[in-house]
Amino acid sequence: MADTKTRNDERCFCCGSKNDRGLKLSFSYPEEGRAETSLTIPEYFTGWEDLTHGGLISMLLDETMAHACLSRGTPGVTAELTVRFKKPLPVESIVSVQGRTTEVRGRTAATEGQIQGSDGTVYATARAKFFISA
């Protein structure tokens, strides 16, 4: 389901295989308009006292929601991102990140996402709008 027409230079920090410093995330697409990934939060993303930096949390949500857009053939760039931090996320936690497209109208797509721990705890949620580029 992922859009194979979108050019991928493989340098993306989140999912690029050619970025030596990147996370090299692998995404799955359980259905059109949805994307998922999972990872163990690296210790070097500590923001304060063994808690994950909020910038990484925001980036993971943004990337996963962008992949949700890709999965339906509407690639785009982030126009707006709102993150709600629910609980502090310890580094070295195993988390899953889900994103879904909720609406496409004209040249914009609306999305939602969340990060949750292996025990089901929701650490953060997000909403974003993407400018559709193709």
Image (cartoon, grey):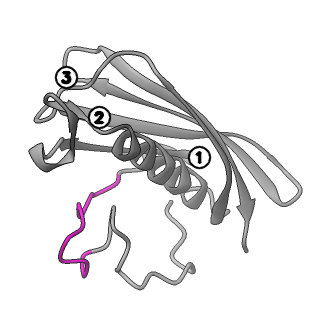
State how far apart marks 1 and 3 are (Cα): 23 Å
Q: Is 8 located above or below residue 35 in the figure?
A: below
Q: Nearer the viewer, residue 83 or 29?
A: 83
Q: Main secondary structure of the magenta part?
A: loop
Please give the residue where the numbered disc 3 appears in the rendered image.
118
Q: From this viewpoint, which residue is outermost toward the front? A: 48
Q: Do labels 3 and 2 touch, CB within 8 Å?
A: yes
Disc 1 secondary structure class: loop
Please give the residue where the numbered disc 1 appears in the rendered image.
33
Under mark 2, the amino acid is Ser
Q: Is residue 30 visible?
A: no
Q: Do labels 1 and 3 touch, CB within 8 Å?
A: no
Under mark 3, the amino acid is Ser
Q: Is residue 26 magenta?
A: yes
Q: Nearer the viewer, residue 51 or 28?
A: 51
Q: Is 91 located above or below residue 32 in the figure?
A: above
Disc 3 secondary structure class: loop
Say whether disc 3 or disc 2 marks the residue closer to the N-terminus. 2
State how far apart marks 1 and 2 are (Cα): 17 Å
Residue 80, how many percent across, how many down?
69, 47
Where on the picture, by quarter, is residue 82? top right
Please give the residue where the numbered disc 2 appears in the rendered image.
96
* Residue range corresponding to the magenta coloring: 17-27
Q: Nearer the viewer, mark 1 or mark 2?
A: 2
